[in-house]
Image (cartoon, rainbow, N blue to C red):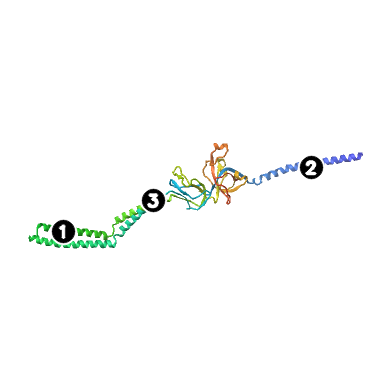
Amino acid sequence: MFSIKKFTRTQILIAAAVLVVLVVLITRHGSNSKPAAAASAATADPAPITKSIVAGPGLVEPNSENVKVGTELAGKLKTVLAEEGDHVKQGQLLAELVNDDYRAQLDSARAQAAQAEAAYQKVLNGARPQERQQSFAQMQQAQTQLTNARRDYERAQQLSAAGVISRQEFDHAERDFKVAEDQLKAAQQQFHLVDDRSRDEDIAQAKATLDSARAQVEQAEAIYQKTFLRAPFDGTILRKHHRTGESITNSSVTPDPVFTMGDVSGLRVRVDVDETDVSRVQEGQRVYVTAQAYGTQKFWGKVIRVAGQLGHKNLQTDEPKEKTDTKILETLVQLDPGVHLPVGLRVDAYIQTAEK
């Protein structure tokens, strides 16, 4: 029994010695490994880049933005041909104003232009051959009458000198001769007027009258065409503001559009980025938007334009700070092809920015 207890004590002592040696070795190994660990930390690669988010409210709009379509004239709508949701082509007739008075003004201007055209051609071409022939015949007749009047006047001179005729008869023959001379001069002038080429100043005056008449036609035509409302581009009617029979009023201060339309073949989101985040947003960054009506569904796109100047908020949310914090950087996001959302839908946009 005594020998067993002694053997056990020896083993305990050996085990204690081994434990001490292990502690010393571990302590030395730990002290020697600290510089290596420090060196390893100093040469480690930078922390990986992680994604951060810049959020802001946004509004869905068509690629063309919302375009107000109306006329420059005030009046009553004769007919409205398009409805909300219609897809229209550029130049397609959308509505027409009551325009009978404008049509009458155009017809009158065209008639005056036709008269001016005829007068110009007459001056430019001169008299017709028939008019020349008639004028030449009148001149020949006046020449014959002068010849006869001269012969009678010369005979009357001889008879008056011989005392055969009275002074009154001589005066009558002399008067007929002078009248015949005047008539021949007038006939000659008329013939030359008809036969000669028109004067340059007459042609210029007739041309100016014609140009003025044509300008009146163009003006009347332009006003008349403004009574027809046509689509400015291919797109979709988003809103109809007036119906057939209603009157519209237009001014430079308060335009009165008939339709709102846009190109919805692609959609964009106009996002309000808070001024504290402007340095983190740039073109090309990926973006997703969400809307309460679509739950957790995400609609992706990318930043295509960042405004160069801060402005006021386009959208107001329920955040109390918006009453004083009104500076934002307007950012435009192009949604990926195939995304279909209602135009005018309020969304929340989340712009992915790269940060360390």
348 or 218: nearer the eye? 218
Camera-nearest label, 1 or 2:
1
Q: Which mark is residue 128?
A: none
- Residue type, numbered disc 1: Asp
Q: Helix, strand, or loop for circle 1?
A: helix
- Circle 2 residue: 22
179 or 341: nearer the eye? 179
Looking at the picture, does residue 158 appear above or below residue 212?
below
Q: Which mark is residue 104?
A: 3
Q: Where does the image place residue 231, in percent across and percent down from the top left?
A: 48, 51
Q: Name the quadrant of the C terminus.
A: top right
- Residue type, numbered disc 2: Leu
- Circle 1 residue: 176
Residue 118 in view (yes/no)? yes
Between the residue at mark 1 and the residue at mark 3, the CA separation in whole angstroms equals: 57 Å
Q: Helix, strand, or loop for circle 3?
A: helix
Q: Helix, strand, or loop for circle 2?
A: helix
First in sequence, mark 3 or 2: give its number.
Answer: 2
- Residue type, numbered disc 3: Ala
Q: Residues within 10 Å of mark 2 (few under 14, many from 20)?
A: few
